[in-house]
Image (tube, rainbow, N blue to C red):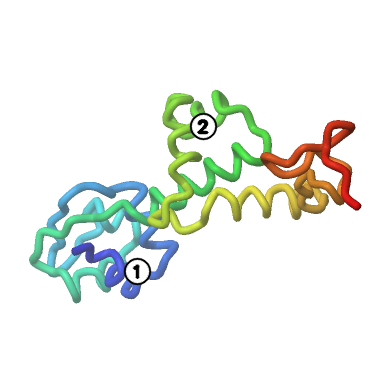
Amino acid sequence: MSNEPEIIELLGTQTTLKLEQTLGGQRKYIAAKPTPESSIVNVIGMEAAIKLATRFGGMLLYIPQHLAARQRNQEITLAVWSGEHKQLIGQRFGLVERTIRKVVQGDNHPRFGLSCRLLRAQTQGYMDGRQQPKRAGKESGGIGTPGQRTGKHAPKSH
């Protein structure tokens, strides 16, 4: 069971995100009385470290990285759908192109929150100032639905 929701409640989303981006995936001892030299104080500041110490002081705390990973994956997906080249995205995030593709394909999974389709719709519809593209169909003069015969070989309707 992740303690991330409790950390978010204590510190807020932005501070938790900063903590996860820097120390996520590690176990850290949380001192009952944080000192200015503490690595946690250096990352989130004394006030937030004191809040963390009131709840987790004297404990070895696993710093999760779910929030940071979700945000990173959403940023990657948005960059891909807005047309940025995967190689440049990979360089920015320190990932190879294959990982970028896997993130975008896997972003449809519920654990990532925002789905690829929703993100694509937002990117195409709002960022470019265009409307969502319509599917080709009989009414739009397109090729029709799968299995439907169109053109001069289509059955005549009476």
Q: Amino acid at mark 2?
A: Arg
Quarter location, residue 153: top right
The residue singled out by tag 1 in the image is 8
Above or below residue 38? Residue 106 is above
The x and y percentages for residue 17 are 39, 57
Q: Dot 2: few (<14), some (14–19), or many (≥20) neighbours within 10 Å? A: few
Give the residue drawn at x 36%, y 61%: 16
Amino acid type at circle 1 is Ile
Task: Give whichever of 70, 17 is nearer the camera.
Answer: 70
Q: Earlier in the sequence, mark 1 or mark 2?
A: 1
Tell me the residue at 31%/53% (across/down).
Answer: 42
| Label 1: element kind | helix
The residue shown at (46%, 52%) is 71
The answer to which quarter of the image holds residue 86 is top right
Residue at numbered disc 2: 92
In space, the residues marked 1 and 2 are separated at their CA atoms by 27 Å
